[in-house]
Amino acid sequence: MLSKKNPLDMLFASITAISSFAVILLIAGILFVLVHESWPAIERFGIVKFFFDTDWNPVTESFGAATNVYGTFITTTLSIIIAIPIAIGIAIFVTEISPDFLKGPIGGAIELLAAIPSIIYGMWGLFTLSPIMSGLIEPFLKTITQDIPIISALFAGPPMGIDLLTASVILSIMIIPFTASISRDSFRLTPEVVKESAYALGATKWEVIKHIVIPYAKLGVFGGVVLSLGRALGETMAVAFVLGNNHRITSSLLDAAATITVTLANEFAEADKDIYLASLFYLALVLFVLSFITLAIAKFFLLKAERKYSR
Amino acid sequence: MKKILAAALVMTLMVTFSLVQAADTLNGAGATFPYPVYSAWAYEYNKITGVKLNYQSIGSGGGQRQITDRTVDFGASDDPLMPEQLQKDRLLQFPAVIGGVVPVVNIAGIKDGQLKLDSESLSRIFLGEIKLWDDAAIIKLNPGIKLPHREITVVYRSDGSGTTAIYTNYLSEVSAAWKSKVGAGKAVKYPVGIGAKGNEGVANYVKRTANSIGYVEFAYAKQNKLVYTQLKNKAGQFITPSFKTFENAAETADFNPTKDFFVWLTNAPGKNAWPIAGATFILLAKEKTGSNKKVAMFFAWAFKNGDAKAKELVYIPLPKSLKAKVEQYWKANGIN
């Protein structure tokens, strides 16, 4: 407890308080600037129309967010679908199966993956992953799905390697560390007593994981997934190189697309007209709101999980 | 604590020092395309005169905004501003160096400068109307060359860029269909193809994708050993891109000092003119005569001594006649 009489303590208390309030002020400031800068576009395009308009054409000065939101939605969802099973598998292995001497190196490797700057993923994606995708993986997916009615439409078109699928794969690699480490921490929260009782009743390892560990950690894992979702939503450089910035809504995963962040990264520096710039700020505002909602959901579930275990 | 104080003191001194130094520093901001040649010139210029150039390559749009707000000594832009716009923002504008854009292809068996295209076939390829390499329109231009019966993959710049502005201005100028369907700008909505980020992205994709066509700055085509095409110019000649043909375009284009040199170097009328080129421009604030003089001195020096360096970096120096026009323009506007 800090005493009120000691001036140094007072100083310390006010410094910490100021730092904390500065964060809130900063967020409010960012929100204000985004709204202020995008105001011409908000006035011109409205909210609903901007959100659902699929046209993004700087030449005719007609701007709508729909293609960007769609691209963001598809890449994030797909990357989560790819990342979750792998991440949970890693977490289960590290907490339940792996011998002790392996836990350190694996944990370290995962954390290292999270420390790689995203531009490296971007360049790696363009020069290494993209040729592999267009040369091997995408033709393979096309061949095995060609006779299945609806799924074949997902892989229509020539495999170019600059597309939604490649971007999602890169994103999934980037978010695996997050999901994996949060899942691992949630799994660890499972009370040893419950697990040991289950083993005592003759349950196998698989049964313990399935009936004890996963149900216990469910909410925590979910929160981790939503946090990774937040990260995937905002990821820019890693996808900018392999998505093509194509403002079209397509049904095929082998088509180029655009996400909000990719559009911003590609077009901000050379946006020459006022309404163009305002529309880009408007897009940023949309992303800000989307990320805020995502994180709010994550927080909600994480809190719920915490309450459950502290009881 | 003492260490922190000492560090703060040093920082303050450094800031003050740099403020004092600012007298000998030129601050510029703008286009990324001419950045390498400006910094190469600035390096030499600094050795001779001690004047430093601080150039932020933040993009043409940023350069225009910063000089309009008067936060820099000069702005740099790949696209010329209209005289009316310059009048409104009280700006001056002159060209500094020239770059060219070339179509590049990747077709098995086709060598450098072997494939001939004209404005119509090029615009129709990028509109998606010509879908195959052995289309009658292409075969007609290339008798005796065996072209594959393969689909054309169009590669374009996905990021906003002066290269795209020059290229789409050319296509809009030569094709009414392009003008009405797509238009010109730094970022346009391409009807077909895939987008790649940056000149390096397009170069990489064309190199890797069989039967593709894209467009890059001349320097990138040379450095990456991409296969460029010949192009039919306004005078009806098939032209190979080279320093000579870019220079011819600059010599024959209508650079008019009374219009602040506003011109797109596309479809120039010269007999040997490569049709897709563009000057990159410098913007000055009209009332800042003091700093304008320093900027003009730098470029006067560069015009005189910088041609070899520019060519080494695959930029096309302004032709003599144009340099003279720029120097007259400075005089007419009270600089020099």
Image: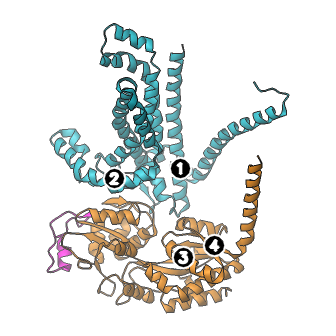
Chain colours: A cyan, B orange
Subunit of mark 1?
Answer: A
Q: Position of residue B307 (x, y in %)?
A: 49, 86
Q: CA distance from mark 2 to mark 4?
A: 40 Å
Label 2 is found on which chain of the structure? A
Decide if residue A136 is on the left or right side of residue B40: left
Dot 2 and dot 4 residues touching (CB under 8 Å): no
User: What chain letter is assigned to the residue under label 3?
Assistant: B
On residue A256, the disc is 2
The subunit carrying tag 4 is B
Q: What secondary structure is found at the residue carrying circle 3?
A: helix
Question: Helix or strand or loop: what does disc 1 sit on?
Answer: helix
Name which residue type carries label 4: Lys
Quarter assignment of residue B17: bottom right
The residue that label 1 is drawn on is: A282
Tell me the crowding category of disc 1: few under 14, some 14 to 19, or many 20 or more residues within 10 angstroms, Cα based. many
* Numbered label attached to residue B88: 4
Q: Which mark is residue B38?
A: 3
Q: Looking at the picture, do discs 3 and 2 lie on one chain? A: no
A115 in the magenta segment: no
**Vertically, is B208 above or below B300?**
above
Which residue is rendered at x = 54% and y = 18% of the image?
A307
